[in-house]
Amino acid sequence: QKPLLGPRFGIPLLLRGPLMSLVVTCATNFPAAQVCLNSLILTIYIVIQAMARPWKVPLLNWVDMCISVLLIQITMLSGIAVSSEAFSDVFNGIVMGTFLGIIGLMLLAVGFAVLQELCA
């Protein structure tokens, strides 16, 4: 299947980071608003990503989509950690473990894609 956006997919990808930073800058004293708006930005990005299918290897599209969904879940759960100090230490450990797992999963997917390209 031909990707919908093709090489123009980089535009939403480049806008995602500055938009998320802008939310934190504009809503400095409102953590609940930051969580909601950052989740909204990530959700819109996932919809665009699902339509665009930017990677040639279908496995990378699937892994990128799963990682984005996990980022949304972590963002939504961070609202709980903001309100509770006792929960914060345990939650920080879980979040760090999840981020390391996501990085490892992405490296495995990229390695698999490279191997698939070399063997083809």
Image: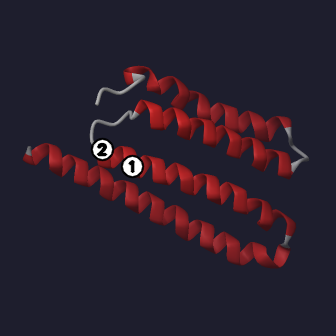
Q: Which residue is mark 2?
A: 58
Residue 63 in the image: above or below residue 18: below
The residue type indicated by label 1 comes to: Trp
Count neighbours of disc 1 (C-alpha within 10 A) and say few if under 14, some if 14 to 19, many if 20 or more.
some
Residue 2 position, x and y percent, is 30, 26
Count neighbours of disc 2 (C-alpha within 10 A) and say few if under 14, some if 14 to 19, many if 20 or more.
few
Residue 14 position, x and y percent, is 54, 28
Give the colouring mode of the picture: secondary structure
Local secondary structure at mark 1: helix
- The image shows a total of numbered marks equal to 2
Residue 99 position, x and y percent, is 53, 62
Front-most of 67 and 87? 67
Residue at the location (52% across, 23% down)?
11
Left or right position of 27 against 102: right
Front-most of 66 and 113? 66
The residue type indicated by label 2 comes to: Pro
Residue at the location (86% across, 40% down)?
27
Residue at the location (66% across, 38% down)?
41
Looking at the rendering, which quadrant does residue 57 occupy?
top left
Q: Which residue is mark 1?
A: 62
Local secondary structure at mark 2: helix
Residue at the location (46% across, 32% down)?
51
Looking at the rendering, which quadrant does residue 24 occupy?
top right
Question: CB atoms at circles 1 and 2 under 8 Å apart?
Answer: yes
Disc on res. 53: none
Left or right position of 36 against 119: right
Residue 114 position, x and y percent, is 21, 47
Image quarter in which the N terminus is found: top left
Left or right position of 2 against 92: left
Image quarter in which the C terminus is found: top left
Q: How far is mark 1 from mark 2, CA to CA? A: 6 Å
